[in-house]
Amino acid sequence: MKLAIIGSGNVAYHLAKAFVENGVSISQIFGRNESELQKISGELQIPFSVKNLENANVYIISVSDSAIREVSKKIKNSDVLAVHTSGSASRNALNGNFRKGVFYPLQTFSKSRVLDYSEIPFFIDAENENDKLLLKNLAEKISKKVLFADDEMRKYIHLTAVFACNFVNHLFSRAKEISDSQKIPFDYFFPLIEETVKKIHEIEPKFAQTGPAVRNDENTLLLHESLISDEQQLKIYKTINESIKKMYNL
Ligand SMILES: NC(=O)c1ccc[n+]([C@@H]2O[C@H](COP(=O)([O-])OP(=O)(O)OC[C@H]3O[C@@H](n4cnc5c(N)ncnc54)[C@H](OP(=O)(O)O)[C@@H]3O)[C@@H](O)[C@H]2O)c1
């Protein structure tokens, strides 16, 4: 089976690396960004092109969601399987006469990070059982956790991930703005952040909540509000406290 990857961003890079590390050869990595393709190709010894998309049996298209439709048009063969890696785009965002599928890894990917691919849940989908099995076998080369999810379920997985990962990371950025403004090293907070994440493996997040809002400590809430000068920080502070109070009927 010939496997090609289209795209040279975070996910394309990590998938290529995960396959290579697990002995799955990639016949080509194709895209529009020559310098990024060159780096990936150099590191992982995979042929690349910005011009000619080679024939393959399976194409993994890992480009921005808005480009999936356009980029998938480059696949002209019909007897091939093409998948995208998006959490939110429907399987039919792929445009062509080929067989369509999805190969969605539930993780946050940045090129500079080293990841344990075996722990990443992969959510796969395809039009027929043979392709589902093919994708399951392919994902199982990388990961111990391979599951099926249709468009509807995957949308909700992605929505959950936005709350659990993207929003949390944004709160880290806002927290760091505050500590930076007072010249307090942000690494003081690492043990706190790590324990916050670790404890939800054992305690339901709802029961692990601490802080002034769940204690209904109005004095501290007002004190904090008086310390915040940034409009966005204040909006976030008030909105999340309101949400906490609603959840606990306070
Ligand atoms: N990052 C994550 O944590 C994550 C996790 C799971 C799934 N995903 C999904 O995986 C896919 C790729 O995400 P990513 O984070 O790897 O994105 P990314 O790092 O921003 O890379 C996007 C890639 O798409 C290419 N691209 C964008 N517009 C294009 C166009 N019009 N024509 C051709 N190529 C185009 C970019 O090329 P240029 O470099 O030339 O712009 C780049 O290679 C998305 O569907 C995303 O939803 C992402």
Image (cartoon, grey):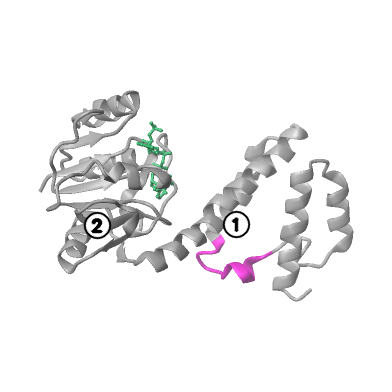
Q: Are dots 2 and 1 in contact, CB under 8 Å? A: no
Front one among 208 and 227: 227
Which label was assigned to residue 196?
A: 1
Is disc 1 placed on a helix, strand or loop?
A: helix
Q: Amino acid at mark 1?
A: Thr
Asked if residue 17 lies left or right of residue 226, the reply is: left
Residue name at image x 56 percent, y 70 percent: 204
Q: How many marks are shown on the rendered structure?
A: 2
Image height of 122 relative to 59, above or below: below
Indicate the quadrant of ligand 1 in the picture: top left
Is 203 covered by the magenta stretch? yes
Q: Quadrant of the rendered structure where residue 47 is? A: top left
Counting from the top left corner in percent of width and height, residue 85 is at 34, 51
Residue under pointer 2: 100
Real-space CA distance between mark 2 and mark 1, rounded to the nearest whole angstrom? 40 Å
Amino acid type, residue under disc 2 in the picture: Lys
Whole-percent x, y for residue 179 in the image: 72, 38
Few, some or many residues within 10 Å of mark 2 (<14, 14–19, 20+): many
Which residue sits at x=59%, y=67%?
Answer: 205
Residue 149 quadrant: bottom left
Q: Is residue 141 visible?
A: no
First in sequence: mark 2 or mark 1? 2
The part of the chain drawn in magenta is 199-209
Specify whether residue 95 is painted magenta: no
Q: Is residue 33 left or right of residue 137?
A: right
Quadrant containing the C terminus is bottom right
Badge 1: how crowded within 10 Å, few (<14), some, or many (20+)?
some
Q: Secondary structure at mark 2?
A: strand
